[in-house]
Image (tube, rainbow, N blue to C red):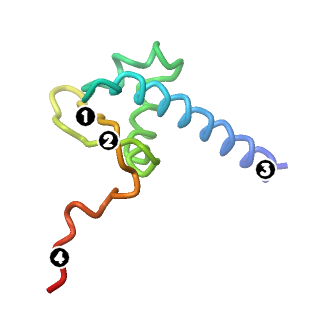
């Protein structure tokens, strides 16, 4: 029974992550988007804590770049849309000579 609960929790977490990713893509469509979890929680139907736990992993999703930008009473996140996900992670790689 605990295996089923774990699978259900994983599925729910994945749905939350996808919902948050969709929201962030929409908000960052015209460039970049800065936010604090507590200010977007109602928009996505999650708690600030849930958003804060999901944000670092969203940077690994295709099409999003999520950075921890600043901290003043809460983390400020900078989100941009990666126009060319195929190049993700290659910009900072030095050329081999």
In three-dimensional space, the C-alpha distance between marks 3 and 2, rounded to whole angstroms, equals 33 Å
N-term mark: 2 or 1 = 2
Q: Quadrant of residue 95?
A: bottom left
**Residue behind mark 4:** 95
The residue drawn where x is 60% and y is 39% is 13
> Residue 33's spot in the image, x, y percent?
27, 26
N-term mark: 2 or 4 = 2
Nearer to me, 3 or 58: 58
Given this view, does label 1 or label 3 mark the residue nearer the observer?
A: 1
N-term mark: 3 or 2 = 3
Residue sticking out furthest to the bottom = 97
Query: Would you say 93 lies left or right of 65 here?
Result: left
Identify the disc placed on residue 78.
1
Residue contact at pointers 3 and 4, CB within 8 angstroms: no
> Residue 26's spot in the image, x, y percent?
42, 23
N-term mark: 1 or 3 = 3
> Residue 61's spot in the image, x, y percent?
46, 47
Identify the disc placed on residue 40.
none
Q: Quadrant of residue 79?
A: top left
- The C terminus lies in which quarter of the figure? bottom left
Identify the disc placed on residue 66.
2
């Amino acid at each position: 029974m605990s295996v089923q609960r774990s699978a259900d929790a994983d599925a729910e977490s994945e749905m939350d992550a996808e919902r948050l990713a969709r929201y962030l893509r929409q908000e960052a469509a015209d460039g970049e988007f800065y936010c604090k979890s507590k200010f977007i929680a109602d928009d996505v139907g999650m708690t600030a804590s849930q958003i804060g736990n999901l944000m670092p992993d969203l940077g690994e999703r295709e099409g999003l770049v999520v950075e921890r930008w600043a901290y003043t009473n809460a983390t400020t996140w900078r989100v941009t849309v990666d126009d060319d996900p195929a190049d993700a992670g290659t910009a900072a790689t030095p050329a081999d000579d």
